[in-house]
Image (cartoon, rainbow, N blue to C red):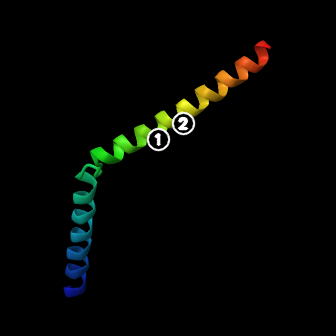
Amino acid sequence: MFVTSTVCVLVFLYITSVACRADREPECSRFHYEEQLLVKMVRMEFNVNAYSTDLTVFRR
């Protein structure tokens, strides 16, 4: 009886701890978002410059 109640209590504690972690929103920094946005903008600028160079080569 003691083992069964102990197992039940442990299972209950495990389920509640998992549920608490699932309810939290993911931690996201404003600076992380801005950094990722800046990286994407730099990549896009590089691609636009590359396409622009390709277009000038094809026009000749």
Q: Amino acid at mark 1?
A: Val
Q: Is residue 16 above or below residue 39?
A: below
**In which quadrant of the rendered image does the C terminus lie?**
top right
Distance from disc 1 to disc 2, alpha carbons, whole Å, reads 6 Å
Depth order, front residue of 10/31: 31
**In which quadrant of the rendered image does the N terminus lie?**
bottom left
The residue drawn where x is 26% and y is 71% is 11
Q: Which residue carries the number 1 mark?
A: 39
The residue drawn where x is 76% and y is 20% is 57
Quadrant for residue 35, please give it.
top left
Q: Amino acid at mark 2?
A: Arg
Depth order, front residue of 39/17: 39
Quadrant for residue 43, please give it.
top right
Label 2: few (<14), some (14–19) or many (≥20) C-alpha neighbours in 10 Å: few
Label 1: few (<14), some (14–19) or many (≥20) C-alpha neighbours in 10 Å: few
Q: Is residue 42 left or right of residue 26?
A: right
The answer to whether the residue labelled 1 contacts the one labelled 2, judged by CB atoms less than 8 Å apart, is yes
The residue drawn where x is 41% and y is 37% is 37
* Extreme residue in the bottom direction: 2
Q: Which residue carries the number 2 mark?
A: 43
Depth order, front residue of 11/54: 54
Query: How far from the left and from the top, in percent, is residue 28?
Result: 30, 49
